[in-house]
Amino acid sequence: MHIGILEDDATLAQHLAEVVQSAGHSSATFSTAKAFLSALGRQTFDLLVFDWKLPDQDGIKVLKQLRASFQSETPVIFLTAMHDEQAIVTALEAGAEDYCVKPLRPAEFLARIAALQRRIYPIRQGTGPQTHHGYTFDMVERVITWEGGHAQFSGKEFELARFVFENADRSLSRDRLMQEVWGREDDPFSRTLDVHISRIRSRLALNGSSGLRLRSVHGFGYQLITYAAAGQDD
């Protein structure tokens, strides 16, 4: 997962990044609410970790803005020194999924992240076939089949298609897609991602005719839509 960390203590933020990376996750850290909210326009996060007290705005207000203004359902864990019962209730009622009290206990923290990941995001099951929205992915042969068609892909295109299907109806940033498949951030002068997306869209009939539509999100990235509106034009 790609985890966003909103924490103004630089030492703790670095420690958090190291802890989540030790479990195989990537991360980005932000010391102010303004910097984090600005990043939402160009990055896709799978999980967010919020401190309560920040230099420019408290974490509860950031969470409410995330849910209301950005219409984001990205899960949020609070990690804060606020330990009274009312604070926990306030965070959960505002839309947080979990709450941890400082000081950081790495093993417990990673266990909570793993529990959220199991509940919210699909688990990749080894090398056996996987089916998403009527499309079956053969993990060995890299063949994708659906009613009325099949296609074999290169490694990168196959992984990109699988990731898009696993995250259907989520807007995925260019950086997130590049990190997941190529292990690096997007180069604004490269058309690598766009070419691969175009081939996937064409070869898998993701233009609305199959009930699915792979569309561009202007200035951000791409989204696989799984409902009838997929037949509309960009």
Image (cartoon, rainbow, N blue to C red):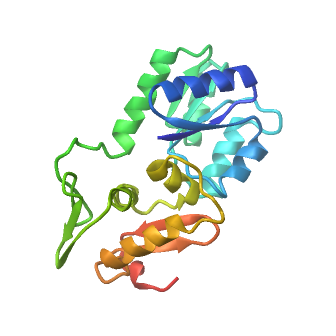
- Give the residue drawn at x 78%, y 46%: 34
Of the pair 156 and 144, the residue shown nearer to us: 156
Question: Is residue 86 visible to us here?
Answer: no
Q: Nearer the viewer, residue 44 or 226?
A: 44
Query: Measured from the top left, where is residue 200 in percent x and y?
Result: 37, 71
Tally the numbered discs: 0
Q: Which residue is drawn at 36% across and 81% down?
A: 208
Residue 134 at x, y percent in the picture: 22, 66
* Residue 180 visible somewhere in the drawing: yes
Q: Residue at x 43, y 63 (%)?
A: 169
Q: Is residue 102 left or right of residue 122?
A: right
The quadrant in which residue 225 appears is bottom left
Rendering coords of residue 27 (x, y %): 58, 37
Is 99 on the left-hand or right-hand side of 138? Answer: right
Q: 227 above or below 37?
A: below
- Apparent side of residue 17 relative to residue 131 in the rendered image (left or right): right
Up/down of 3 relative to 195, above or below: above
Residue at 52% in and 49% down: 179
Left or right: where 82 falls relative to 33: left
How far from the left and from the top, in percent, is residue 42?
65, 57
**Quadrant of residue 210 in the image?**
bottom left
